[in-house]
Image (cartoon, grey):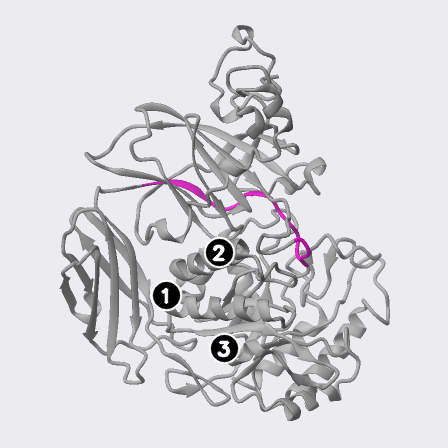
Amino acid sequence: MLERSDLADNAINCLHDELYDVPFNLQNFNHANMVFMGGRATESLNGHWNFAVDLLDTGLRQRWYQMQPIPAEERTEPWDYDPYVGETTPVPSCWQMQKEKWYFFEGSAWYTRAWDYTPKAEGERVFLRVGAAQYDCKVFLNGEFLGNHYGGSTPFFAEFTGKLKEGRNWIMCMVNNTRTLDRVPMRNTDWFNYGGIYRDIEIVRTPTAYIKDLYVHLVQDSQYNKIRVDVEVEGHQQDVTFTIDELAVIEKLPLKNGKASIELAVQPELWSPESPKLYNVKATCGDDVVHDRIGFRQIEVKGTDIILNGESIFLRGISVHEDDRSLGKVVTPEDLKRRFQHAKEMNCNYLRFAHYTHHESATKMADELGFLVWAEIPVYWAIDFANQATYQDAENQLLEMIKRDRNRASVIIWSVGNENADTDARLEFMSNLVTKGREYDNCRLYTAACLVNHAKNMIEDRLADHLDVIGINEYYGWYEENFDDLIDIGKNSNPGKPVLISETGADGFIGEGAPARGFFSEAYMSEVYKKQIDYLKRLDYIRGISPWILYDFRVERRQNMFQKGWNRKGLMANDKFTKKESFGFLADFYATYL
């Protein structure tokens, strides 16, 4: 095709240069250029985009992004792909859910669409916001490479200001979901590797000077009578006006070097699962106005207790993945409402959002409904802990998650990882994540799902010294046999801080061909839950649990005759309607804590 054209420069380089990706891996779309979104108007770019999978990265090699719309009869070379005409796919979506031939595809895919730009205000700034794309997303505008983003679950922004033409503009995104040894997560995971732009993609316009960040929280001093406001403005300096009408707050915040902070004496009604009170806050800077709905609460640790607003709390939880039988990783409002309704029926007050940053609507809905949330990044299993580039990827994902959701009262725990071997490199990597996280948000607890030494029957993980709460994943009755070991872990460990059972459970397949007894039978799953509940009643060092998992979810690595590509540990089947017996057992157990 274009190997000998001016676009490709040189046929040999085009075909044989395996460093072709280096100029396109800047990772310059990151937490540093996030834009605060509360209350902003957006222009949706959701819908059908021109689309092509690109297993060999021919698009980068041949510079598809520089191709201009030309009628076929006027072309001077035969094109292998036409970005402007042909197959389309919906955005948001996961390409695995669109065609069977793409189900196991891992690699690059190209998205192209036109957007007609008309300026709305003098000096406006224009950004492309991508809610999430799995995993590396490169953005091109009118043939120019603007940058890329690493991380499959957090939002990013590409600024279009000064690069747009009035009228038609062409936006291209190359998305790559290949699992590599230096990414976060790495190659081996236990959930499905979806690909694509699977959350909303939209245009955001701001004034020349705009509010880049707004962080509002209760001062964590156990007095409950002060809130702190931190604001950052990009552009020329103006004062920021901050208001909470219901609390009679109206304050001018003078900016210094684009930032301002203030502590205000107020006595808000505290947010809790029983009373999820939220306040409408507003910040104004010149022509820019942003809003948010914020709850005020204090979460802390005292000894082995978790304390919410001065009261000890037991976290009655369930783990959840973003996964749907029809939509894959795409989340809809109806799906979210159903998820929280099932958690409510189970008498939960808490959800573990595993193993990556979930949709922003999930934490907002948790705020409104009064659910506590454990949120985490996918530092999962084997990670290249000695690789500084891998650490930067993980740190950026953590900070993007924190910046997006640190105004959410529901989020009480940030998790920096899950089931990693305790090595020196891992200790430095993950303890640095905790330290960095605290720089941006010290109003929440930090945790990780740590390791249990089954030879000694004790929690033995050096990272625990750096955490507020210790998470442990235990599968007695499934991967481990002797339930009495669970009692001994508590006796032997003396952790000195709260412990959460972040995972426990067993597979239970229901439906045609289901076994009547033994592994993968609903009867066996029920017995495991009955025993777990019996033992959990005796474990006073446990301050919460989030069994694995609410719904059966899709995963490539589980392929026996009962799993068939699904993890069957869900308390509900993958239809998100059929409850297994264990659902009721757990609901009854949680009712004793109400």
Q: Is residue 6 above or below residue 150?
A: above
Q: Secondary structure at mark 2?
A: helix
Q: Residue at 55% across / 39% down in the picture? A: 175
Q: Quadrant of the N terminus?
A: top right
Local crowd size for mark 1, using a 10 Å CA cut-off: few (<14), some (14–19), many (≥20): few
Residue that badge 3 annotates: 466
Q: Tell me if residue 258 comes above or below residue 10 in the rendering.
A: below
Return the residue nearer the eye: 107 or 515. Answer: 107
| Amino acid type at image mark 1 | Tyr
Q: Quadrant of residue 426?
A: bottom right
Left or right: 561, with 38 as reference point: right
Q: Residue at x 73, y 83 (%)?
A: 531
Residue denoted by label 1: 440
Q: Position of residue 94 (x, y in %)?
A: 59, 43
- Label 1 and label 2: CA atoms lie apart by 16 Å
Residue 164: in magenta span:
no
Disc 2 residue type?
Gln
C-alpha distance separating marks 3 and 2: 19 Å
Q: Which residue is mark 2?
A: 392
The span picked out in magenta is 187-204
Horizontal relation, residue 244 to residue 307: left or right: left
On the image, which quarter does residue 195 sit in?
A: top right
Q: Which mark is residue 192?
A: none
Identify the amino acid type marked 3: His
Give the mark, 3 or 2, whose residue is nearer the N terminus.
2
- Above or below residue 579? Residue 193 is above
- Packing grade of label 2 (10 A; few <14, some 14-19, many >=20) is some
Circle 3/circle 2 CB separation < 8 Å: no
Q: Main secondary structure of the magenta part?
A: loop
Residue displayed at 64% across by 67% down: 549
